[in-house]
Amino acid sequence: MVNMSAADGGHPVRFISWNVKGLNGPVKRAKVFSHLKQLKADILFLQETHLRVEDHNRLRKAWISQVFHSRFNSRSRGVAILITKRMQFTPSDVISDPNGRFIIVSGSLFQIPVILVNVYAPNWDDVQFANRVLSLIPNLNTHKLIFSGDLNCAIDPLLDRSCPRGTFAGMAKAFSMFMQQNGYMDPWRFLNPSVRQFSFFSHVHHSYSRLDYFFIDNSLIPMIRQIEYTAIVISDHSPVKLDLCFPLNVRERPLWRLNPLLLSNEKFCSYISANIDTFFETNKTESVSYSLLWETLEAYLRGQIISYTSHANKERRKEMQVLLKSIWDLDRKYSEAPTAELYKSRVDLQAKFNLLSTNLSEQLILKTRGLYYEYGDKASRLMAHQLKRQAASRLIPQVRDMHQNLTSNPKEINNIFATFYSSLYASEFPSDKTNMERFLDNLEIPTLEPEEVENLDRALGQEEINNAIMAMQNVYHAIYLEELTAIEMTEKIAQLFNISPRQIHQIYKQGPTGIHVLVSDEMIQNFQDESCFILDTLKAEGCDSYHIILK
């Protein structure tokens, strides 16, 4: 981490860039946003969101006001720029890549014109992509550039890789030359000219690289407060933090609210009960009125609750920080001298961090469900937002008439739909039935022999299933799970092979030593997005069903 004495005045704005490796799973998404809130993010640059166009509303949280996302309608790639409610940002222009590789947002941040660029570059050396992105950035003469993303290349192959290479990639040269010629710089490398720090860990090659960057305008150097690569957790990329001080960014102290989840904590309830008893023993006298006693108790309990929650939050943050610091230190040691013991230690620490972050995510999901349960069917702001979103999704702004002319007039649109459905459901039954009866009388309908019917109705055998799998060895079939459960996976695999789900007895995953581990709901929830498996079958004992083996 590097700190600088920033320009006078103004609270720092924290920019965070992170390749999150998919946000489709609710638990993974909650863990990511919980971690981002702990990092106190203000403006987020997210890569590999894996969200389709209709799923972009999953990024809209209570503390996020603006969402800008690429228009790639597939569960891969995808970049987004999120602005929190604390930021005074007014967008003026948005350029979105239809292939989900970049998004460019121009606007004003605390009355300073800026260009926010978020890039997820291909994982091959594509110089044309780099040149195309850079050529599309507008208003470079009038706006301050803040460029970030996963570039999938090392700008300096000697310092930005744990296994240095002597050759520069074409994309790295294109990005580097653009920054040098137009007066932009890498703030982390500017403050750390010879330090080796990495943002990506490859579990396949057991190597580290610095692939995630910030590039900013040279005039923003005095505004830098700090820049830091945090620990690699949740994803295989590290969140990158950049703090820039904006003079007009003034923060107010937030209002205190009771967290209702505390009421399910037995330790908290015992603590509050003991404090109430102590308060009444000390202050309940004949000279004190009940109204004054009640108001004083409210103020006293508020202070005790704030003290309890502050201590609990500090302890939880301390535990998280210790884990993050330990993971960060192990990554640094492993990048210099990789050993099996260090890798095992890192996996253990990662498991502890995942468990802790999953507990926090479960609390956030429970809190959201409680909010919907309490206010979902009441005349409140939450219901107003839901109705507005529902009405907006059903709005038809334009249609073409019978002459293929576009119209946006509501009355004309209603008339076009009325005419269409009137003709659609109008009866086309002929008045003269002679031709129809003649056709049906002369029609010869083929029939199946009893042996053919019996052959079609019999259950599929293991040999037939194996032949079907062998015929698909070189073909990938995508399975999208609407629910992360073993039952859902069983039904999807049955649909893939065109068999009944009852013919699948169990699903196992083959471990590294060849053992078969039963696939449960928890295992499926921890599958990475776009996981690939080879399917094999095994006859189940005592029944006519089969086991599916994921290899």
Image (tube, helix red, strand yellow):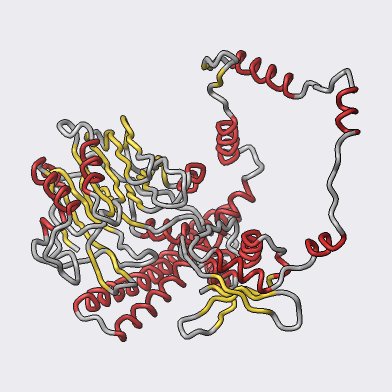
Q: Residue at x 50, y 46 (%)?
A: 55
Placement of 239 over or under 102, stated as above or below: below
Q: How many marks?
A: 0
Residue 272 falls in image quadrant: bottom right
Q: Nearer the viewer, residue 465 or 72?
A: 465
Q: Nearer the viewer, residue 372 or 493?
A: 493
Q: What percent of the width, then of the height, locates residue 35?
A: 39, 60
Q: Horizontally, is 460 left or right of 468 in the view?
A: right
Q: Can residue 62 be seen by looking at this rendering?
A: no
Q: Quadrant of the N terminus?
A: bottom left
Q: Nearer the viewer, residue 186 or 381?
A: 186
Q: Residue at x 52, y 17 (%)?
A: 406
Residue 462 falls in image quadrant: bottom right
Q: What percent of the width, then of the height, locates residue 232?
A: 32, 67
Q: Residue at x 29, y 73 (%)?
A: 205
Q: Horizontally, is 418 left or right of 484 in the view?
A: right
Q: Horizontally, is 70 left or right of 226 in the view?
A: right
Q: Nearer the viewer, residue 396 or 498?
A: 498
Q: What percent of the width, then of the height, locates residue 540?
A: 69, 80
Q: Residue at x 40, y 40 (%)?
A: 66
Q: What percent of the width, then of the height, locates residue 17?
A: 30, 53
Q: Horizontally, is 364 left or right of 110 in the view?
A: right
Q: Can residue 188 be seen by looking at this rendering?
A: yes
